[in-house]
Image (cartoon, rainbow, N blue to C red):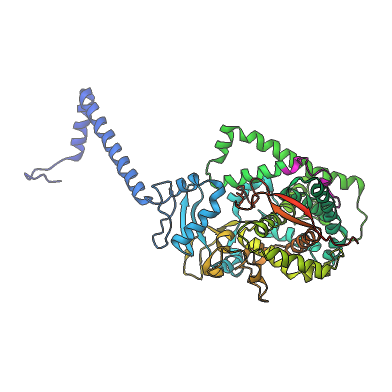
Amino acid sequence: MSRPDGTLFNMNAAAGYITRASEASPAFKSLLKSITRRNASRLLGVYMLWIIFKYRHTAYGTKPRYDIKGPRGWPLIGNMFLMLLTPRNQISELNERLHQEYGATYTFSVPKLGRVYQFSDPAVLEHVLKTNFWAYEKGPMLQETLKDLLGTGIFGADGDHWRWQRKMASHIFNVNAFRNYTSSVFVKEAGIVVDYLSRMADEGRIVDMQNLFYLFTLDSFGEVSFGQSFGCLKTPEEEVEFAAAFDRLNTVVFNRLFEGVWQLREWVTGMDKQVAKDKKIINDFAMDIINSRRTKGYDKQQKDLLQLFMDTDTEDGKPLSDEMLCCLILNFIIAGRDTTAQALSWMFYLLHRSLSDSSLVPKLVNEVDTVLEGGLPTYESSKKMKYSEACLYEALRLYPSVPRNIKVAVQDDVWPDGTKVYKGEYVLWSSWAMGRSTDIWGGDAREYKPERWMTGEKPSPTKFPSFHAGPRTCLGQQFATIEAVTIMAMLFQNFTFELVDPHTEPSYVPGLTLPMEKGLPMRVHRRAAPAPAV
């Protein structure tokens, strides 16, 4: 190589000179190391600045999306502070507020979860849940988060494992079965509730109606699905250990969805010990059901849910393990106990709060008296009580038992509104926010108006997603509706109700479902002209 003065520059010679100099002079060697360290530090600094700039509004590793509106994030952590600082019992209100601010589709990012798209357009929901159903799954992250409560059961399962469980469960949710359940289970269990409330009315005692509905649905579902009433209604004042543990786990696994390092937090706080204890309680409860069936056998003509699964092999031809049977029991209990009980609780609140139209309860009572004529409900009579059903569905619109849902894209997709979603990104919708959207339900969306269900035109499942939609539509929708209408009819046939605090909206407990935090305290009075006993 030529130097500026025209002489030749020998690279090898120069390298040799530097080497000899460094060997001869420790100071020169130290200088070289210093220069190297400074360069490395500068390179690292530049790299960090570039990373911070690249993820200046999103969580690290999340693809920026400047074409979609959403709450502004912090560098590297995205919207983590927004999620952590929002009280868990205000998450649904946050979903609603962000839709009002950013529109039907907005996006945010959090560490570990990455990019999340939240939407409220029924057309997009139909695309996600029906049109392009197989492009979205629960995914391994959600399954890991929920495993302590739901295990490998139907609510967290995907693909063939989900399809197989659903096919088996569908056998007990049919019209002929509903007719049997109404007379042999729902009316019988509701009769126990009536007897208890009669005593409470005579004694002038306040009743937690949410707890009573929980006990009713747990006993009813136990008898239908597992061949035994759990006897919870015999002593309503006593805490059901299984139910308390189940509810605690429900809250724990829900909170995990907002924390990338929930394992560390639960270990540091010692919560992992309570989780293990509660998990043992609910698993022992499920195993007692299984062992009881194996000991006593089953001789009824129509198989219940438990017997269906015990007599069926898995997808690979092997009998179900005890662990899998436990998971199945717990998954169906959350569907059969929580959702219907909570829907009834919110409906009773909405009917009796100070803001509600005073004509609602008389209309409902009139329908009950007209249809039943003093008799007990049947499957056929329950199907005739359209206003009662409207009161229930209107409550579910405003207070959905499953207020939000999330899935992960397993392939790239484009929504009807033009939004591009990439594989590995999450999509979320809030049934709470959709039920209160004026774009979907009109200017009176936030009002409790059962009459909106009496027009003869039922809203599509993606406009009213309280029972989900598409292939994963709730198998128990009609089951839950008939169960709820049955007990509603028997209660309004015999009693009037009064909220202890009709002016305050109950707060809810954060969870996969929507329970009231402090129950639903009510005063119960016998009707002035009670229906004749049958």
Is residue 424 among what the camera can see?
A: no
Is residue 405 among what the camera can see?
A: yes
Vertical position of residue 270 compared to residue 183: above or below: above
Q: Residue 395 location in percent, x, y?
A: 65, 61
Kindly identify the residue that appears in the image at 75 percent across and 42 percent down. Answer: 242
Q: Residue 210 location in percent, x, y?
A: 71, 50
Image-based side of 181 in relation to 24, left or right:
right
Looking at the rendering, the stretch of residues picked out in magenta corresponds to 227-243
Q: Residue 229 location in percent, x, y?
A: 84, 50
Kindly identify the residue that appears in the image at 73 percent across and 55 percent down. Answer: 497
Along the line of sight, the residue nearer the viewer: 35 or 366: 366
Vertical position of residue 527 compared to residue 368: above or below: above
Residue 444 in which image quadrant: bottom right
Q: Count all numbered tags in the image, as a single digit.
A: 0
Does residue 455 belong to the magenta stretch? Answer: no
Q: Most extreme residue toward the bottom, as rendered?
A: 456
